[in-house]
Image (spheres, rainbow, N blue to C red):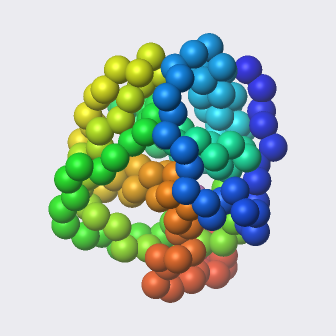
Amino acid sequence: MSVLPIVTYPAPVLEQPCARVTVFDRQLGRLLDDMYETMIAADGVGLAAPQVGIAKQVAVVDIGDEHGRIELINPVIIEARGEQIDVEGCLSFPGLFGEVPRANYVKVRAQNRRGRLFTLSATGFLARALQHEIDHLHGVLFTSKVIRYCDLEELEG
Ligand code: CO
């Protein structure tokens, strides 16, 4: 596994829709492993393929809870309910944080690295992380949804 360079804003790959994955091969597995290692090295809780320069519908999430490492290929939100507003950041926007409204509950259908379909239900912070990463796969950045930016002193205070 290797740590990949993270693409930071502005970069065209961050704002374009990603292609669906149709081939579930060893190369995809390697991409997922590298993305996970990259996310951990950057102290993140999620990473989408365009953030390593690859416009494919691939994302990894690990918020450090019992769900562990979540790999999402071609993910789709099939249910969303409720609302939460909390502070969000993004590895492609170092040092930038803002309050973003998100659904409080989502059900996601995706494929795993072998192409098998699964569904995942999540609330709270995990639901937020999933929505953030799935947005990336459609070229949607959290900055387009921020309702109020935070300054670092406020967060640390
Ligand atoms: Co992000």
Please state which of residues 81 and 125 is positioned toward the viewer in this rendering. Answer: 81
Please state which of residues 107 and 12 is positioned toward the viewer in this rendering. Answer: 12
Tell me the quarter of the picture where residue 72 sits. top left
Q: Relative to residue 9, is residue 64 drawn left or right?
A: left
Residue drawn at x 28%, y 64% as measured from the top left: 103
Q: Quadrant of ligand 1?
A: bottom right
On the image, the x and y values in percent for residue 137 come to 52, 52
Q: Relative to residue 64, is residue 154 drawn left or right?
A: right
In the picture, the quarter occupied by the C terminus is bottom right
Residue drawn at x 65%, y 28% as measured from the top left: 31
Query: Residue 134, can we see it?
Result: yes
Please state which of residues 20 and 128 is positioned toward the viewer in this rendering. Answer: 20
Residue drawn at x 76%, y 68% as measured from the top left: 10
Residue 35 position (above or below residue 18): above
Q: Relative to residue 11, is residue 24 drawn left or right?
A: left
Q: Relative to residue 13, is residue 110 drawn left or right?
A: left
